[in-house]
Image (cartoon, helix red, strand yellow):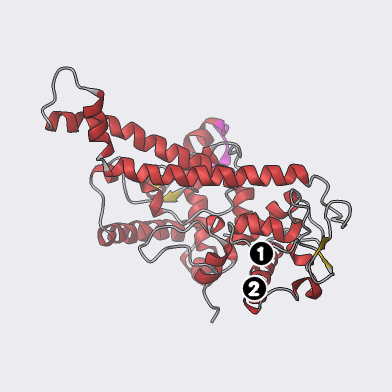
């Protein structure tokens, strides 16, 4: 689904946009037990075999509810009906509590068919910090602050899980009685989990710094809707006697894609540099051939995000505030044809890529 649709769906479902729980998955039929997969993880082959069996059971129920021939003619709605059925089952207790006793809906197959009730045990939702979250399709339409809060929650879960591990390490080292701080520190620092968490927390810190940069730039450029030189932005003297929209030492910084999109459309209010998209050919005449090539590549990347945002019904304008640019970015960045997984299979956060990395990972359209 498009990012804007997923964002709107979470809002309509009543999820709190200012909490980590906003990143919750949609209800789906998942053939694993969340607790069991922590201690007995399934291989990809074993999981796929279970999934195929459950998918078959779900399809049989949908055929009974809506008619096999009808579904055969309209395969595009299968996914919609599957998620709808899962949503019905996960909210079944509340639905039965609210429906009047003599409501006609209670006599439909959704409530009376044993096969429908049997599927209920497979319906689950997941959060990014849950071990079974990997079995769901990648979520989109998540604001950056929600991703950061979800990451903190995930690291909190890891910290909670460290306590029994530390106790186990102490027992394995036969440490009884009083244990010195240096002994505990030595055991903890040797843990691969701690080393991995240090890396993740450093990434979170970098993201928070980026968010602070957004806030500072927005405060310095509060009225950016017109973007007039001399009002919000300056012209700068260059050694060749010309005045340009950027200072002589200016270069295209290789910053995060999200921040570059702000610079492209809104400029740098703290440095009083206009939006990059407004740089004229005469401005760029002092650049090297390589830097002009980078500008052309950047322009193509930014315009692809604009195009995707418009396809998701988020309008772009010639002059945008930072809030406008943020909305457009969230609506369009996930559809710029960047591969969402690394060669090792890890999920790649497109919004956190440097813009030049996003260019490198972009897949050519066939």
Along the line of sight, the residue nearer the viewer: 56 or 131: 131
Q: Residue 196's x, y, as percent?
A: 35, 46
> Is 64 left, or right, of 98 in this rendering?
left
Along the line of sight, the residue nearer the viewer: 251 or 318: 251
Along the line of sight, the residue nearer the viewer: 183 or 310: 183
> Is 143 left, or right, of 87 in this rendering?
right
105 inside magenta stretch: yes
If the image is split into quadrants, where does the N terminus sit?
bottom right
Q: Which residue matches tag 1?
A: 251
Q: Residue at x 41, y 35 (%)?
A: 156
Q: Which residue matches tag 2?
A: 291
* Magenta extent: 98-107
Instruction: Please tell me which of labels 1 and 2 falls first in the chain.
Output: 1
Which residue occupies the extreme left position in the image? 174
Which residue occupies the extreme top position in the image? 177
Q: Is residue 231 above or below residue 48?
A: above
Disc 1 on helix, strand or loop? loop
């Amino acid at each position: 689904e498009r990012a804007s649709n997923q964002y709107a769906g979470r809002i309509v479902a009543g999820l709190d946009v200012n909490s980590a729980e906003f990143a919750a998955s949609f209800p789906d039929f998942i053939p694993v037990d969340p607790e069991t997969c922590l201690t007995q993880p399934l291989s990809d082959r074993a999981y796929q075999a279970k999934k195929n069996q459950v998918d078959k059971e779900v399809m049989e129920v949908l055929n009974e509810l809506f008619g096999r021939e009808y579904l055969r003619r309209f395969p595009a709605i299968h996914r919609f009906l599957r998620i709808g059925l899962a949503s019905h089952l996960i909210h079944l207790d509340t639905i039965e509590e609210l429906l009047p006793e003599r409501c006609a809906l209670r006599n439909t197959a959704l409530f009376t068919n044993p096969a429908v009730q049997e599927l209920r045990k497979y319906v689950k939702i997941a959060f990014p910090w849950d071990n079974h979250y990997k079995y769901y399709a990648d979520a989109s339409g998540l604001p950056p602050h929600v991703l950061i809060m979800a990451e903190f929650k995930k690291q909190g879960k890891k910290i909670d899980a460290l306590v029994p591990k530390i106790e186990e390490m102490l027992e394995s080292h036969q440490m009884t009685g009083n244990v010195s701080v240096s002994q505990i520190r030595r055991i903890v620092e040797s843990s691969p989990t701690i080393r991995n968490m240090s890396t993740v927390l450093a990434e979170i810190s970098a993201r928070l710094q980026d968010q602070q940069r957004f806030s500072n730039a927005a405060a310095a450029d509060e009225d950016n809707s017109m973007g007039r030189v001399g009002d919000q932005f300056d012209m700068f003297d260059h050694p060749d006697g010309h005045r340009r929209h950027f200072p002589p030492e200016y270069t295209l910084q290789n910053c995060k894609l999200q921040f570059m999109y702000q610079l492209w459309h809104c400029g740098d209010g703290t440095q009083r540099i206009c939006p990059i998209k407004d740089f004229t050919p005469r401005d760029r005449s002092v650049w090297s051939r390589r830097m002009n090539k980078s500008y052309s590549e950047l322009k193509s990347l930014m315009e692809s995000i604009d195009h995707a945002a418009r396809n998701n019904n988020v309008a772009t304008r010639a002059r945008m505030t930072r809030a406008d640019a943020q909305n457009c970015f969230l609506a369009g960045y996930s559809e710029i044809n960047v591969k969402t997984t690394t060669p090792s299979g890890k999920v790649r956060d497109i919004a956190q890529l440097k813009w030049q990395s996003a260019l490198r990972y972009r897949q050519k359209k066939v």
